[in-house]
Image (cartoon, helix red, strand yellow):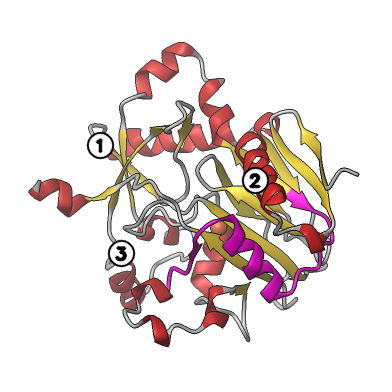
Amino acid sequence: MTTITFEPVKPHIGSRVHVDKARLCEPEVVQAVRDAMEQRGVLVFPELHLTDAEQLAFTDAFGQRLNYTSAAIEDSAKRDEATDVYKIALGKGATLAPEFVYATWFWHTDGVTVDQPLPKATMLSARKLSPTGGQTEFANTFAAWSFLPDAEQAAIADLKVIHRLEAAMRHVFREIPEDRLARFRQAPEMVVPLVWTQPDGRQSLVLGSHADEVIGMSYVAGRSLIERLIEWAAQPEFAYSHDWREGDFVIWNNHGVMHRVVPYDEESGRNMHRTSIMGDLRLGRPVEVLATA
Ligand SMILES: [Fe+2]
């Protein structure tokens, strides 16, 4: 009997995975999921209904669990295991301040504006849905690069982009309040290659609302380039929109997929439980580190 089967969703992105959740942490299942995620970018496990403990067990079997917040706490004994599962929600019970949740309504890559190896994978369980909106959209940035015309590839191959949390937040606020702005500016400005050549030789575009400024171009020309590349990457051929059902479990390769959420009813209590997998590649460097190097 086959333990796990994969069913493609679209030619360039996405597979549905069928597996008995009791077998999810078996080493050969985990390896098959890792391989499929590399190939397909996004994997959907329909209505798996994982508990937090089950999701953490799979997260730990898959790689090294990453908690953006607890990583800053030096004493590991003080880390609260429960916080390793982020409640992505607005209002009561949410792990993050609302502006960080609203920022997910725009194309982004997780963790680019944190000075750490780029998180490898993100995992979400749908706990409560909104009656309207809330689909998560994914775009394959390997495909976006490889289908660019040769001349456009050559023109952008060596560019570097400054990513800023502040840039992502400009989409959320008409005017960023002073206290928030000061806080956002504490995040490092990360210099990241626009085209990322990964260890297996594949190349992806690193894009998102946090991509602010192209080094060596005027601000406006750089912004235009970034916007056009995001539109290119998000074209339907490279993208998949996941219409959630309660209990769905979705994982994606944060090294080759950007994502966003379709706006939803803010009073709905929509709640997604997120875990993350640490990456092993430090893609960017803070601006000030480069300046003093
Ligand atoms: Fe995200």
Q: Is residue 80 above or below residue 164?
A: below
The residue under label 3 is which amino acid type?
Ala
Q: Which comes sooner in the sequence, label 1 or label 2?
A: 2
Q: CA distance from mark 1 to mark 2?
A: 39 Å
Q: Residues within 10 Å of mark 3 (few under 14, many from 20)?
A: some
Of 45 and 174, nearer the camera is 45
- Give the amino acid type for the residue marked by disc 1 in the picture: Ile
Q: Can you give x and y, in whole percent of width and height, for residue 116 in the image?
A: 34, 57
Instruction: Determine which residue is flagged by label 1.
Output: 215
For disc 2, the neighbor class at 10 Å (few under 14, some 14 to 19, many from 20) is some
Q: What span is in magenta?
A: 44-69
Q: Where does residue 2 sit, x and y in percent of width and height? A: 87, 43
Residue 236, by quadrant, is top right
What number of labels is visible? 3
Q: Is residue 231 left or right of residue 111?
A: right
Whether residues under marks 1 and 2 lie with C-beta atoms below 8 angstroms apart, the answer is no
The x and y percentages for residue 173 are 46, 66
Q: Relative to 14, is 107 above or below?
A: below
The residue pinned by badge 2 equals 31
Residue with the mark numbered 3:
187
| Residue occupying image coordinates x 40% and y 67% | 175
In the image, 115 versus 162, the foreground residue is 115
- First of labels 3, 1 by sequence position: 3
Q: Which marked residue is nearer to the observer: mark 3 or mark 2?
A: 2
**Left or right, 247 with reference to 255:** right
Residue 132's quadrant in the figure? bottom right
Residue 76 is inside the magenta segment? no
Looking at the rendered image, the disc whose residue lies closer to the viewer, 3 or 1, is 3
Alpha-carbon span between mark 3 and mark 2: 35 Å
Q: Are marks 3 and 2 in contact (CB under 8 Å)?
A: no
- For the question of whether residue 102 can be seen, the reply is yes
The mark nearer the N terminus, 3 or 2, is 2
